[in-house]
Amino acid sequence: MPADLLFWLLVLPGMALGAYAQSSIKYTVTKYSRVPALSGATGAQVARYLLDARGLNGVPVEPTEGVLSDHYDPRSQTLRLSQSIFYTPSIAAIGIAAHEAGHAIQDADDYFALEFRSLVVPLVQLSAQIAPWVFIGGLILDLPRMAWVGAILFGASTFFALVTLPVEFDASRRALDQLVKHRIITDERELEGVRAVLRSAAWSYVAAAVSAIGTWIFYLILVFGRGGSNRA
């Protein structure tokens, strides 16, 4: 099978799913950003309340630049919310804020998947920088072992994408549990709105995993084929 066709067969599904996930999350967040939260609480207030309720008074909640740039940094133990989430009392804001608070709660609970993901971040970043040079160098210089090393290094990103899935799904589960437990949302329509926001966000992580797996398989097949040609 031609390499070009093989590339599209393996990578196109991830690209298509990624495009769908991005459009879905933008549409859903925009839709529910226009729906006021019955509690009147902003994203920042919800995050602060959930953290304090868990005894995480020392975790700051800060506004940050960008759109959908919300995240929890386990290194500095800081929760950062984009300004549209930080200052807005909407269904989208409280859902996203609760999700990030879920990550802080994971950290406090020593949730293994989160700790493991944080541990491998430096390795993944280093591999991402080295892999293209090693892989391409191996192909150009006709050094199969070098190309294999590069392909294996590409696998670090795939591994990271897979490890991210349980971390994000668990944070969303915790978010819903905490919002209901503390009666921040009591209306079924609000609950369904939060579910929709978190569900659309989850698709972006699924898409990243599918794309990473497809791309990695392509690199492995490419090196394997080159090795087979050399043996012939």
Image (spheres, rainbow, N blue to C red):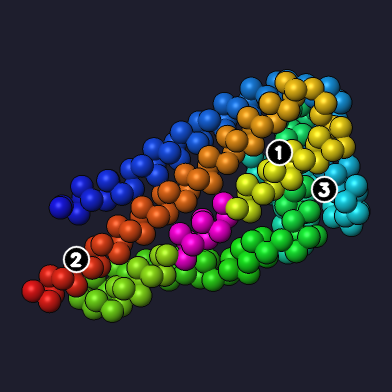
Q: What span is colored magenta in the figure?
A: 156-165
- The residues bearing labels 2 and 3 have C-alpha atoms spaced at a distance of 51 Å
The residue singled out by tag 3 in the image is 61
64 and 124: which one is in front? 124
Residue 149 placement, left or right of 104: left
Residue at image point 45% right, 59% down: 158
Q: Quadrant of residue 66?
A: top right
Q: Position of residue 110 (x, y in %)?
A: 75, 64
Residue 112: x and y, percent? 68, 64
Q: Which residue bears the numbered disc 2?
A: 225
Task: Return the residue at label 1.
Answer: 96
Residue at 81% over, 41% down: 178
Main SS category, magenta section? helix
In this rendering, the count of numbered labels is 3
**N-term-proximal mark, 2 vs 3:** 3
N-term-proximal mark, 1 vs 3: 3
Residue type pointed to by label 1 = Ile
The question of residue 167 being in magenta is answered with no
Front residue of 109 and 87: 109
